[in-house]
Image (tube, rainbow, N blue to C red):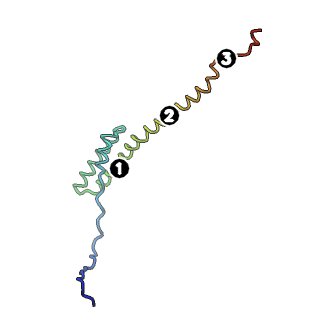
Amino acid sequence: MDTSYPREERSPPKRGQPPAAPAPRDHLVWAIFNTLYMNFCCLGFVALAFAVKARDRKVSGDVEAARHFSSKARCYNALATAGSVVLPLLLGALIVTGVIHLSKLAQESVGFFTYQFSGSDDEDQ
């Protein structure tokens, strides 16, 4: 048996209760960001309220209520973020396509509204 290096004594793994589920996230930072910068239809403020409730329940030890409020905070945060990002992009796309359509319509109608001064002289004779 080789004893030239110290061996580590390993204790057998303890068999007990499985590790408890991690505490639910409260999404407070995301809610604060949405409240300050992306408060679409006050959804950021609603998300902040549910995030604070989730944090209070987590601190008091009520994990099920904390999960419930955390889920609601995540939902409202996602709605506020999507509403603040997607709707302006959609509005911008509609404006751009409208301008392109109007410019093509104006180019096509130029021929209709122009009067030809240098036409054939058949009418003069």
Pick whichever of labels 1 and 2 is earlier in the sequence. Answer: 1
In three-dimensional space, the C-alpha distance between marks 3 and 1, rounded to whole angstroms, equals: 65 Å
Q: What residue appears at the point 64 percent right and 23 percent down from the top-left corner?
A: 111
| Nearest to the observer: residue 124 or residue 38 | 124
Q: Position of residue 83 (x, y in %)?
A: 40, 41
Q: What residue appears at the point 74 percent right and 13 percent down from the top-left corner?
A: 121
Q: Position of residue 47 (x, y in %)?
A: 32, 45
Q: What residue appears at the point 40 percent right and 44 percent down from the top-left corner?
A: 82
Q: What residue appears at the point 62 percent right and 27 percent down from the top-left corner?
A: 108
Q: Which residue is mark 1?
A: 74
Label 1 Cα crowd, 10 Å radius (few <14 / some 14-19 / many 20+): many
Disc number for residue 96: 2
Q: Nearer the viewer, mark 3 or mark 2?
A: 3
The image quarter in which residue 38 lies: top left
Disc number for residue 116: 3
In the rendered view, tell whether residue 96 sits above or below residue 57.
Answer: above
| Nearest to the observer: residue 68 or residue 10 | 10
Pick whichever of labels 3 and 1 is earlier in the sequence. Answer: 1
Label 3 Cα crowd, 10 Å radius (few <14 / some 14-19 / many 20+): few
Q: Hey, which residue is sitting farthest bottom in the picture?
A: 1
